Image (cartoon, rainbow, N blue to C red):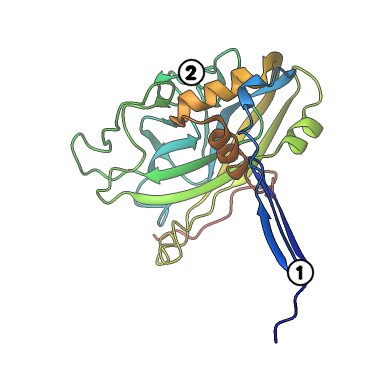
Amino acid sequence: MIARGAFSLIALGLFSTAAVAQSAGEAATSIVVQPAFDWETITVDWVERRYKVEAIRFKARDETGVDWPGSDEVMVGTFDAKGATVTNEIGDIDSGDVHEFDPAVSCIIGVGPGTVTLGKSSVCDEAGEPGPFSFKVEMWEKDAFGYPPGFCAALAPPPGHHNGPHCVNDQNGDDFIGWRELFFPLPDLEATLPNVGDSFTETVALNPCEGDDICGEPWAGFPDYAFTYRTTRLPDVRTTFRDELLAAMRRSGIERAGDAVAAGLRALPTPADRQAEAEPEPRQTASLD
């Protein structure tokens, strides 16, 4: 025999609530559906902190392969939520060499939309980007194959995004040098750059393993490169929740405000340790006579 009693269930959600009740001798169900919340009616405004990130230099602590036959011909690419910037080929890089970027044309975060080349025309716009953000840097050693040699064509950037005229890897035998993905959570940005005009320069070692089963050139030793970049806090910008929401909906193509808010919350990155390090002296590598 099933006991007769009373049960209740309350489900709390963002857009609807439901209550179900059952009593002895009588079953009754009532469902109350609240209207969808209109996110666009929020009128809160705030002062938003803005930032830019620029490439400063890279250092070949140990070039690809053995040192004596030749030099590395390097291409550097950076990838963020709004596109990519890639250098032209940077040749004659040997172990211990340093390549300096011109930060005025080497923007990584805060790049204006359009076609840009890192180190030539990748200029930060005046507004910068709000945190949190992230970017990935990749470096490849170009081989003398393909047409034109050492380059491959990239697709034109979509509206509001940036891209370069070519891509970092031509898929035609280039040697992988290294990569690093860097995350900038809001607490880190606010603690490191508390004032407008503050800047912070950081150097990171690149991971020479392209994947779980592709890891540099074991027969000659892994390439060892370091990448240096600078983060700067720009003047604050006053904005509103509604303006930011509508801009995000236009960029993403999402038609419902609630879906855009949910997508943004899901996209928040997990904070990660950047493991910054100073640049050591180049390692001594054996050469063949």
User: Which of the 4 quarters of the picture holds residue 183?
Assistant: top right
Q: Position of residue 100 (x, y in %)?
A: 53, 28
Residue 113, x across and y down, in percent: 44, 19
The local secondary structure at tag 2 comes to loop
> 85 or 146, which lies in front?
85
- Residue 159 visible here: yes
In the orientation shown, which residue stands out farthest toward the front? Answer: 25
Q: Residue type at mark 2: give it.
A: Gly
Q: Nearer the viewer, mark 2 or mark 1?
A: 1
- Decide: few, some or many residues near mark 1? Use Cα within 10 Å; few <14, some 14-19, many ≥20: few
From this viewpoint, which residue is outermost toward the bottom?
Answer: 1
Query: Which residue is pictured at 54% across the width and 21% down the height?
Result: 246
Q: CA distance from mark 2 to mark 1?
A: 67 Å
The residue beneath circle 1 is 24
- Figure check: 279 above or below 289: above
Q: What's the amino acid at mark 1?
A: Ala
- Label 2 crowd bin: few (<14), some (14–19), many (20+), radius 10 Å: many
From the image, tell me which residue sits under label 2.
112
Residue 62 visible? The answer is no
Dot placed on the residue nearer the N-terminal end, 2 or 1: 1
Residue 44, image quadrant: top right
The N terminus - image quarter: bottom right
Residue 158 percent coordinates (x, y): 36, 26
Q: Secondary structure at mark 1?
A: loop
The residue nearer to you, when weighing 180 against 38, is: 38
Q: Where does the image place residue 270, in percent across and percent down from the top left?
A: 66, 49
- Placement of 215 over or under 57, stated as above or below: below
